Amino acid sequence: MNQEHTGFIPLSLSEYGTLTAQLSSLLDTKYPPVIIPGEAILGIEAVAAGIAAPGRTILNVVTGPYGNLFGQWLERGGATVAEVRVSFDEVITADEVAAAIEQFQPVAISFVQAEVVTGGSNPAEEIFKLARKHNLITVTDSVSAVGGEALLADDWEVDFAVIGAQKALAGPNGVSAVSISPRGWQFLESNERAPRNSILSLLDLQPSPDGTAPLRVPPNIPVLEARALIRALARIEEEGLAQVIRRHELAAASAIAGITALGLQPWQKDSRHYSTLTTTVRINGEQKLKIKQAVGIVAPGDGELFGQLLRINHFGVNASRTSVETAIQTLAELLQQDPEQAVQAVRQAWGE
C-alpha cells in the first residue's frame, strides 16, 4: 500500500525537511518554522504563552475577535497588555500604532494581519517598519493572510508569524506553523515562564542551535495532514505565489464590484484595506440577508457580527471568478433581484 495513503508510516526526516523548506520559501525566510501538531489557534496560544511574563508590556492591536483572545492569553501569562482597539468595520492605521507605541513603551507588538471575520487587512508592512524603528519584538497572526497577501518574514524582520493552510493555501487545517526569527528565539529563551514539556512549548521544538535545519521530526506531528500540507504547498509553488495572491486580489475586487451592483455596501469602511480573502457585506437591517447558515461561500457573521454582516469567503480554490459569480447570484436570490447586471460587473472586474 502506498505510504501516502496510510497514517501508520511516520513522517521521515526527509519529508519534514521538505515541509519546512516549503514553508521557509513561502515566507521568504532562511529559518525553518516550527511545525505545530494541530490547528493554527494552537500556535497562536503557544506564542502568547511563550512571550508573556510579568514586567513585559506588550502592545496588542485589536481589530477583530482573535486580537481579543490573544490579549487574554498574554494577560494570563502575566504580561501587561496595552491595547489599541478600533471598530471591527475598520483596520488600524500606522499613526494609531505609532501613538500607542509612544504612549505605552512596549517591548513587543502583536496584531492580526488579515481579518477574515471582518473583511479587513491591517497595514502589516507599515506596522513592521514602526516596530523596527522602536526595536520591538513583532508577533503576527497571519493564519489567513499567507497566500492572499505578502509576508516577507526576513525582509520585514518578523519575529513570530503564525500561519495556517486552510484559507488561501487550500490545505489541511490539522497542522500549522510558527515562523520564528533568531531574535524571537532569544526572546523566548529569556522568559523563565515560557512553557517546557507542554503542548504549548515552542522551545521544545526549536529546530537546531543555529536555526537553519531540523534535527529531528517533532513528536505528535499528524502524518496525513503533514503530507497533505506538502502537497498543498507544492501546488502553490507550481502556480506561483505571486499568481496565487493575484487570484485572491481579483476575487476581492470582483466581489466588491458585484455587491455594489446589487446596491449593497461593504462592511469595511476603507477601500484601501479590504481583505483579499473575504468580502464582508453590510446588512443594514435588510432582513432578507439575515441567513442563519452558509449558502455556498456566502456565510453569516460570526459571534457579535451575526446579523450585521455577511461574508463571501473567496479564498483558496474559491478565489475564482466562477465562485464569486455564484456568490453574487446567491445574494441576488436572497434579495429577489435579477443577478445579470451584478454578474457582468464581476466579469468586468476580473478582466473578462
Image (cartoon, helix red, strand yellow):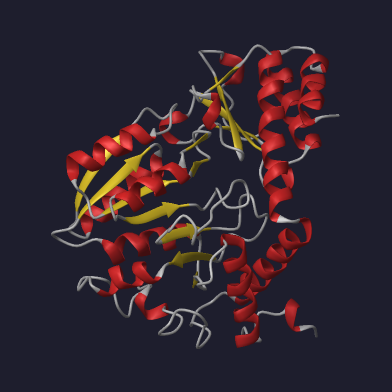
Q: Nearer the viewer, residue 223 or 102?
A: 102
Say if 52 sits above or below 104 in the image: below
Q: Is residue 21 left or right of residue 247?
A: left
Q: Quadrant of the N terminus?
A: bottom right
Q: Residue at x 54, y 53 (%)?
A: 151
Place residue 10 in its image quadrant.
bottom right
Q: Nearer the viewer, residue 197 or 348?
A: 348
Q: Residue at x 49, y 33 (%)?
A: 118
Q: Specify whether residue 36 is in view.
A: no
Q: Residue at x 64, y 69 (%)?
A: 22
Q: Quadrant of the C terminus?
A: top right
Say if 101 sits above or below 36 in the image: above
Q: Where does residue 174 sit, x and y in percent of width and height?
A: 56, 64
Say if 186 sits above or below 3 in the image: above
Q: Is residue 342 left or right of residue 208?
A: right
Q: Where does residue 143 sit, x and y in percent of width and height?
A: 51, 53
Q: How many tags in the picture?
A: 0
Q: Where does residue 195 sit, x and y in percent of width and height?
A: 28, 73
Say if 251 sits above or below 340 in the image: below
Q: Nearer the viewer, residue 97 or 221?
A: 97
Give the residue furthest to the right. Answer: 352
Place residue 98 in its image quadrant.
top left
Q: Is residue 253 left or right of residue 205?
A: right
Q: Specify whether residue 48 is in view.
A: yes
Give the residue furthest to the front. Answer: 133
Q: Where does residue 329 sit, x and y in percent of width and height?
A: 76, 24
Q: Residue at x 43, y 46 (%)?
A: 112
